[in-house]
Amino acid sequence: FNPVDFDPEAWVLLAKQAGMKYMVITAKHHDGFALFDTKASDWNVIEATPYGKDLLTPLVEACRRHDMRLGFYYSEGNDWYHPGGIVRRKQLWDDAQDGDFDRYLDEVAAPQLRELLTNYGDVAVLWWDGPGYTMDRDRADKLMAPLALQPNIITNNRLGGGFRGDTDPPEQRIPATGIEGRDWETCMTMNDTWGYKSYDDNWKSTETLLRNLIDIVSKGGNFLLNVGPTADGRIPEPSVERLLEIGAWMEVNGEAIHGATASRFPHLPWGRSTTRVDQAGRATLYLHVFDWPEDGLLHVPGLRNDIRNATLLSGAVPLTATRADDGWLLEVPANAPHPIASVIALEIEGVPDVAAPEAEAVP
């Protein structure tokens, strides 16, 4: 990231074009470096760089102009720079990191949180990270106190000290059945690295990333996909290639992801499903087909609703739907429109009604 090229207006407009309702920026990561004007530390973008300006203020202003909600990521209990920020002594690699964790919380973390929640207007999200191993209830209370400044803020469960927050962010995994009763998002890297390693070439394929996205949304979650920029702020080319390929798919099929909710089907042998209900109560089921049927018939099991319209999103191709004993059969083209996931929109009558599959007989 090169601050000279920082264009908050472009960031916000791109985010809105992609259908985003809010964005979250890293205010301070594990390196302890603050991208904002902080009086609690001189290790910040104003005092420690030639740029010399607060990066958050222009982004806040751009978000306000374009009705984009803004949140902050803050690493509260894992700080590689400030003494005491690393709570496990065996993880220290520099004597300057040694110190008292409680003093770090009192003099750095808590004051910086108060600055973030005071100086930038309404904050939509506070994304905690790195609670460490000694963040007990009393210590967490010190960081919870500033949240009273923003009563409508959404937080995750990574503060520590037993606080659950509002959302769960499972890391590098997708829960098998989602997380019932909780908002959640899977955080995942594109290779094995959160930052940047020139030798990490274990890139996930576009197929894996795209199907992960579909799988997560079909279970009611959000996908937080990481990119690790190089030292000069460039996104590695393998990441760019995969993001462009996912973006091309989204250009055609984005309505089946943005604003969509979880599947109503307990099981689909050929892929996943997402759901959208408009303001008038009309429901659309999106069928994300990973394994295209060789016989030209896609079985939609258990769907009891009448289908008003069936359309292949690629090319807006209308499809014929026929009632079957246990659902519907859709007549589809011989070849899949997309090699990874082809999407069919089913506009149905009434509230989605899907029968549970019959239990398999025990041998």
Image (cartoon, rainbow, N blue to C red):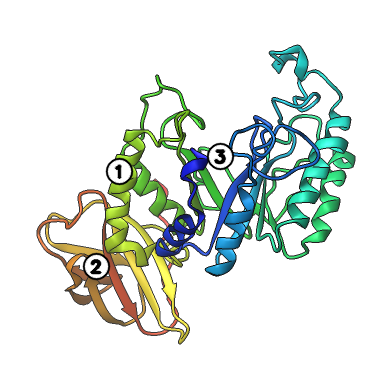
Q: Residue 357 shows which numbered tag?
A: none
Q: Looking at the picture, how far across and down is residue 349, in whole percent? A: 36, 84
Q: Quadrant of residue 351?
A: bottom left
Q: Which residue is mark 2?
A: 313
In which quadrant is the C terminus drawn? top left
Mark 2 lies on a secondary structure that is loop
Q: Residue 171 shows which numbered tag?
A: 3
> In terms of sequence position, does the residue under pointer 2 or pointer 3 come before the other?
3
Q: Residues within 10 Å of mark 1 (few under 14, many from 20)?
A: some
Q: Amino acid at mark 3?
A: Glu
Q: Quadrant of residue 345?
A: bottom left
The residue under the point 77% across, 47% down is 113
Mark 3 lies on a secondary structure that is loop
The residue under the point 80% across, 41% down is 39
Mark 1 lies on a secondary structure that is helix
Q: Relative to 103, say whether 323 is above or below.
A: below
Q: Is residue 189 left or right of residue 54?
A: left
Distance from disc 2 to disc 1, alpha carbons, whole Å, reads 19 Å
> In terms of sequence position, does the residue under pointer 2 or pointer 1 come before the other?
1
Say if mark 2 contacts mark 3, CB within 8 Å: no
Q: Relative to 184, say whether 231 is above or below.
A: above
Q: Residues within 10 Å of mark 3 (few under 14, many from 20)?
A: few
Q: Which residue is mark 1?
A: 207
The residue under the point 76% across, 19% down is 97
Distance from disc 2 to disc 3, alpha carbons, whole Å, reads 32 Å
Q: Amino acid at mark 2?
A: Leu
